[in-house]
Amino acid sequence: MAKTAELIINGKSYKFPIVEGTENEIAVDISTLLEDSGAITLDLGYKNTGATKSAITFLDGDKGILRHRGYSIEELASMSSFLEVSYLLIFGELPNKDQLDKFSDDIKRHTMVHEDIKKILDGFPSSSHPMGVLASMFCAQTAFYPESLDPNRSAEGVYLSIVRSLAKMPTFAAWAYKNAMGHPVNYPDNSLNYCSRFLKMLYALPAEHYEVDPIVASALDKLLILHADHEQNCSTSTVRIVGSSKASIYSSISAGINALWGPLHGGANQEVILMLEAIKKDGGDVEKWINKAKDKNSGFRLMGFGHRVYKNFDPRAKIIKQTADEVLGKLGVNDPVLDIALKLEEVALRDPYFIERKLYPNVDFYSGIIYRALGIPVDMFTVMFAMGRLPGWIAQWKELRENKEPIGRPRQIYTGQNLRTYVPIGKR
Ligand code: CMC
């Protein structure tokens, strides 16, 4: 017998089907609620709302599980590459060697950016945050590839937009940084792999020989894998909701970049380092800062702590912490801020406030420390997150399109004034 849920509103009973996912998670399908009862649901921050059915990423926050297309994040981070994981997320299966070679070659063919986009870049003052510049350049692709605006684009056309997105993202990201430095931009060197190509564009200075450190490139590749997708988070839901209006892939992803920027989402990685630096400057009294985070009137939160879904541990944070140890060791970097981070984590994890609220370090807590060790400037941390999240956004945009999902349009409970009579300006 089909499982149902019963809801009684003002004494009248309504039945709704229960939908089950492949990992036995359940949802009450209330799609007929408004029509049947005249009521809507209210769920601020969508804490209990399933906005879609998706076959891309499975996440169990209580058990600390993260899987892409059925593969655990632990296996992918230790054995795969970022482009392989991108292929998996976007096309549903791990590629064989020929498929991966073709995907990688297709991406290499599109790494150059139209010179006129450089003119747009030149218009940004060097004080611009690279995230704003990145979002703008990404969206500007709609002007250079107007065919991407066609909502009925062929599968080949969509593939070309996907490849262009992945190919140009590192170029845009590196150029956003060069703009902030007031330096001339570098062009992509297609003899290099994805991360090395980005690093060379980021760091190389004119008239200087620049060799990419393979330790840095491989650490970056792992970091990008760890950020590649995370089901219906703020930026991904933004991409899906913008995409649901049949906006182009470039404008949908540009919206995702903007959503990621906020300090409660991807911007937290930048905030973590700023917080650790502030604690260091303040004398390193970790307890004082923990107390500040517990004081609701302070307006301060422990950045890199807590997660909407993970209530046990964030599996990405575990891998990143271990990677931070390895990378700092290999590069011979001794960062005093790491000691503060370790102490902060230790004290917070013993504190009833954090235990009761199930607040653990999230992916952003240690990622900033690695980025710093790799020489990546603080303003670029969230840009690195965006580079990593790109295949996830693409996969979710593609899935939404293939599933022919309806336009996203939530309801509201109106709490404003009732009907009033207009009073002309001189009589108010
Ligand atoms: N420091 C101190 N208290 C916190 C923190 C924190 N970092 N996070 C949550 N709390 C408290 C919060 O004040 C609330 O307490 P109470 O129940 O007494 O009112 C309780 O814990 C629940 O918090 P919430 O804001 O209702 O939880 P949420 O699920 O809406 O927010 C979060 C999740 C990630 C926005 C939040 O934990 C936070 O602001 N963390 C700091 C920012 C951060 O690290 N963000 C990166 C998230 S992971 C990367 C990504 O995917 O974006």
Image (cartoon, rainbow, N blue to C red):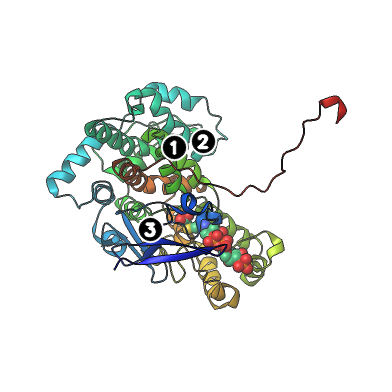
Point 54% across, 75% down: residue:
355
The answer for how far apart the CA atoms under marks 2 and 3 are is 26 Å
Q: Is mark 1 within 8 Å of ligand 1?
A: no
N-term-proximal mark, 1 vs 2: 2
- Can you identify the residue that label 2 sits on? 180
What percent of the width, then of the height, locates residue 285?
A: 64, 69
**Taking 292 as reference, is 244 left or right?**
left
* Distance of label 3 from label 1 (alpha carbons): 34 Å
Q: Position of residue 24 (x, y in %)?
A: 32, 67
Q: Secondary structure at mark 2?
A: helix
Q: Is 389 or 121 nearer to us in this picture?
A: 389
Which residue is at a point 43% across and 31% down the rendered structure image?
Answer: 139
What amino acid is labelled 1 in the image? Ser
Q: Quadrant of the N terminus?
A: bottom left
Q: Name the foreground residue: 49 vs 220.
A: 49
The residue type indicated by label 3 comes to Leu
* Disc 3 target residue: 331
Using a 10 Å C-alpha cutoff, classify the residue at mark 2 as few (fewer than 14 neighbours), some (14 to 19) or many (20 or more).
some
Percent x, y for residue 292?
67, 66
Q: Which residue is mark 1?
A: 254
Residue 160's disc is: none
Q: Is residue 137 above or below residue 233?
A: above
Where residue 328 sits, quadrant-wise, is bottom left
Q: Is there CB contact under 8 Å for labels 3 and 1?
A: no
Q: How packed is label 3: few (under 14 Cα within 10 Å), some, or many (20 or more)?
A: few
Q: Are marks 1 and 2 in contact (CB under 8 Å)?
A: no
Classify the position of the C terminus by image quarter.
top right
Mark 3 vs mark 1: in front = 1
Q: Is mark 3 within 8 Å of ligand 1?
A: no
Which amino acid does the dot numbered 2 rest on?
Answer: Ala
How many residues crowd mark 1 within 10 Å: few (<14), some (14–19), many (20+)? many
Local secondary structure at mark 3 = helix
